[in-house]
Image: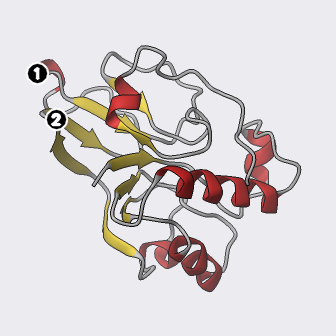
């Protein structure tokens, strides 16, 4: 089992294409590419921590269908655009506003929002977050896991720690 992190997919949110300069012709193309990119790296038994803003402007049944179509065991750390319908989706293994976990010996503090300080920051704990869409200069050991930073797909801790961290790449088209 591999553990992945992502945030700010904004499935169904046409405004995300312009506001965050996403390179997709339509919202449907954006959603399809992100789902294909997700499923290309995440297997059915892998774990994904989605750090908020899963979808916007989608009906509950459409959100449920989108979530059901994404591989992995999915946890939601709620974001500012995750309303009651998103939080209640049956496809989440867990829903919370904050989480701490240790992965491969690394302490992680997970929240939708970037922190100024966080538990264990002086003991090398990482703050993984979303919300800023790659537009905020992070602090040391603070990483934006949003799709706008990571080729519109979930990423592993090893990828997050790699030297080329935070380099925005061109979107991978859906197969």
Give the residue at the far right of this rendering: 25
Q: Which residue is mark 2?
A: 107
How far across and down, in percent of the image, does residue 55 sit? 60, 63
Task: For label 1, count other residues whose C-alpha is less than 10 Å away and answer few (under 14), some (14-19) or many (20+).
Answer: few
Q: Which mark is residue 19?
A: none
Instruction: Name which residue lies at 49% across and 49% down.
Output: 41
Q: Quadrant of the N terminus?
A: bottom left
Q: Is residue 13 visible?
A: yes
Q: Which of the two labelled residues, at mark 1 and mark 2, occupies the earlier sequence position? A: 2
Instruction: Name which residue lies at 31% across and 72% down.
Output: 93
Residues at marks 1 and 2 touching, judged by CB atoms closer than 8 Å: yes
Between 53 and 117, the one lying in front of the other is 53
Between 110 and 74, the one lying in front of the other is 74
Q: Is residue 112 visible?
A: no
Within the image, what quadrant is residue 32 found in?
bottom right
Within the image, what quadrant is residue 44 found in?
bottom left
Between 5 and 19, the one lying in front of the other is 5
Q: Quadrant of the C terminus?
A: bottom right
Within the image, what quadrant is residue 49 found in?
bottom left
Q: In 3D space, how far apart are the residues under numbered discs 1 and 2 (Cα atoms)?
A: 9 Å
């Amino acid at each position: 089992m591999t553990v992945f992190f992502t945030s700010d997919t904004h499935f169904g949110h046409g405004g995300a294409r312009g506001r965050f300069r996403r390179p997709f012709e339509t919202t449907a193309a954006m959603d399809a590419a992100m789902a294909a990119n997700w499923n290309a790296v995440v297997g059915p038994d892998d774990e994904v921590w989605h750090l908020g803003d899963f979808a916007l402007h989608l009906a509950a049944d459409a959100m449920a269908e989108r979530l059901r179509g994404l591989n992995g065991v999915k946890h939601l750390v709620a974001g500012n655009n995750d309303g009651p319908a998103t939080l209640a989706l049956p496809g989440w293994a867990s829903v919370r506003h904050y989480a701490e976990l240790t992965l491969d010996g690394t302490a992680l503090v997970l929240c939708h929002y970037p922190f100024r300080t966080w538990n264990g920051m002086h003991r090398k704990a990482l703050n993984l977050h979303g919300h800023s869409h790659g537009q905020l200069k992070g602090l040391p050991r603070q990483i934006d896991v949003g799709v706008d930073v990571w080729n519109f797909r979930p990423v592993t801790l090893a990828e997050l720690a790699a030297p080329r961290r935070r380099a925005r790449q061109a979107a991978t088209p859906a197969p």
